[in-house]
Image (spheres, rainbow, N blue to C red):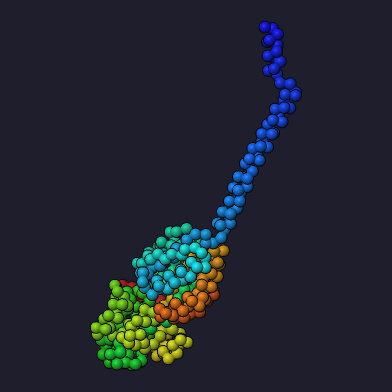
Amino acid sequence: MVILRKKLSFMAVPCQSQTWFRQVLRATMNTRRLALFAPLTIAIGAMACGLAAAQDKYPSGPVKIINPLPAGSSPDVTIRMVAEQLTKMWGQQVVVENRPGGGGLIGAQAVLAAAPDGYTLFAAGGSTFTILPAQKDKLPVDVNRDLIPIALTGKGGFLLAVSPKLGVNSLAELIALAKKDPHTIVIGTNPAGTLPHLAARLLVELSKTPFTVLPYSTGGTNEAIRDILGGRVHAVIETRSGLKGALDSGDLKALAIMSSERHEKFPDLPVAAETVPGLTAIGWQALVAPKGTPQAIIDQLRGDLLKALQDPHLQARFEQIGGMPFRPMPVADLIRFIEAEQKLWWPIVKGAEPK
């Protein structure tokens, strides 16, 4: 028993050679594990690098454009064409979601509620910048502060068109007729507070002519055209694309365009300001991003949108729907253009508010 106990005691205390053997065994096992898991480690590292690269590339997923106007409206058709072109360029889906109401306020709030990461953009109509800022004391959105202009997606002077049955061939003749019979000549427009409605008010103010301005709360221009055909309304103010069908059919006759100069595509169409100085009214739409969007994404959007808008196929599609060809402008010019529009329309907007 004594001998056995001594033997066991000897085995319980490792000798130097035993310690060395165990260290070699552990090192061998660790090397085998490393050899086994090395390919997996490399693969995971490569996936992580690829994911990081994909995240750095914009866009790496679908992009949403919120449109504050109803589906099927002229600006809606235009921005959907732009979205299709960007989809082709990026290889990522660009979808348009309509959020009408509140003069653009509902759409603006939806954009500002989203993350400012370039994946939710806003197709702001001109009225979003010219009407909402004039009401900023009452509303939770300040578009000048909260939205970053990227680029124009459409621009063109409003047309003043009349029924051929009215028997006038110029804006001067229309004004003379309205002054002869005060408040009998009715101009139909989109809802109160929209740019066509404000353009009609500007015509009344600058020409000192007693037109009756009739804004349609529902139906807008389409309803006005129906009433012109029925003889209840005599004139309408709208973009060329909104009037194209009635102009092509001969149900309407354009008297003037409310741009700053005659359009090269329609050189025989007089500018309204030639008869009524200062009568300029331009329909426009701009793609904007919420504040906080990274500058690198803003810069890429501006460059990519410029390429998309210059595509000959897209330009041809614009002309097919009656859109007025326009020249994209640098961002500094776009900001100055917006400021000039606000300076023109804010007094008119204030005057249009209920007393």
117, 12: nearer the viewer = 12
Q: Position of residue 349 (x, y in %)?
A: 37, 75
Instruction: Give residue 351's quadrant in the image.
Output: bottom left
Query: Is 184 in front, or is 352?
Result: 184
Q: Is residue 95 above or below residue 259?
A: above
Vertical order, 41 against 22 (above or below): below
Q: Give the residue drawn at x 33%, y 85%.
A: 249
Query: In the rendered image, which quarter contains the N terminus?
Result: top right
Horizontally, is 305 left or right of 223 in the view? Answer: right
Q: Farthest residue in the right direction?
A: 16
Q: Quadrant of the C terminus?
A: bottom left
Answer whether residue 183 is visible to the viewer in this image: no
Q: Position of residue 344 (x, y in %)?
A: 43, 78
Please state the horizontal and vertical placement of residue 286, each as a whole percent of the image. 46, 72
Viewer-nearest residue: 300 or 103: 300
Q: Residue at horizontal 27%, vertical 88%?
A: 182
Residue at position x 40%, y 67% from top?
67
Which quarter of the picture shows residue 135?
Answer: bottom left
Q: Is residue 217 left or right of residue 326?
A: left
Label total for image? 0
- Quick check: can you spot residue 253? yes
Tell me which corner region of the image, top left, top right, bottom left or bottom right, holds residue 15.
top right
